[in-house]
Image (tube, helix red, strand yellow):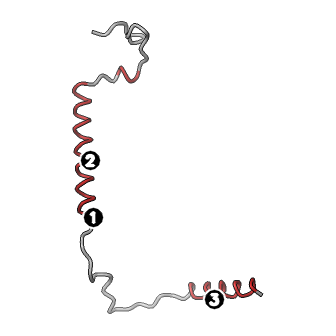
Amino acid sequence: MGKKEVKDNSVELEKKSRTPLKYDPNFKGPIKNRSCTDIICCLLFLIFIGGLVVVAIFAFKYGDPKLLLYPVNSNNELCGYGKQM
């Protein structure tokens, strides 16, 4: 009997979900009691983006991409390039 009751409930739910929604011209949407709640998150995100920009500038100014792309041997020389100045 338990399975039959569950099956009947699912059939009823399917019938309810197939009914079309009615248009209400007086509905104004969820506009009551709304406020901005993500100001702190937005500020933290902007600070994080600013930090990424600072790191990118520092890396562009002082970095050497060849050190990331090519291996270094035991004499600290780039393979294929010899000694670095």
- What's the CA distance linking mark 1 and mark 3? 40 Å
How far across and down, in percent of the image, does residue 8 sit?
Answer: 69, 88
Q: Nearer the viewer, residue 40 or 25?
A: 40
How far across and down, in percent of the image, does residue 40 sit?
Answer: 24, 60
**Where, quadrant-wise, is the C terminus in this rendering?**
top left
On residue 10, the disc is: none
The amino acid at mark 2 is: Phe
Side (left or right) of 23 relative to 6:
left
**Residue at which label 3 appears:** 12
Q: Earlier in the sequence, mark 2 or mark 1?
A: 1
Identify the secondary structure beneath mark 2: helix
How far across and down, in percent of the image, does residue 77 sit?
Answer: 38, 10
Q: Residue at x 27, y 68 (%)?
A: 37
Q: Earlier in the sequence, mark 1 or mark 3?
A: 3
The amino acid at mark 3 is: Glu
**Residue at which label 2 appears:** 48
Identify the secondary structure beneath mark 3: helix
10 Å crowding of disc 1: few (<14), some (14-19), many (20+): few
10 Å crowding of disc 2: few (<14), some (14-19), many (20+): few
Of all residues, the one furthest to the right in this rendering is 1
On residue 38, the disc is: 1
Q: Earlier in the sequence, mark 2 or mark 3?
A: 3
How far across and down, in percent of the image, does residue 69 sit?
Answer: 40, 22
Identify the secondary structure beneath mark 1: loop
**Eyeballing the image, is 60 above or below 38?**
above
- What's the CA distance linking mark 2 and mark 1? 15 Å
The amino acid at mark 1 is: Asp
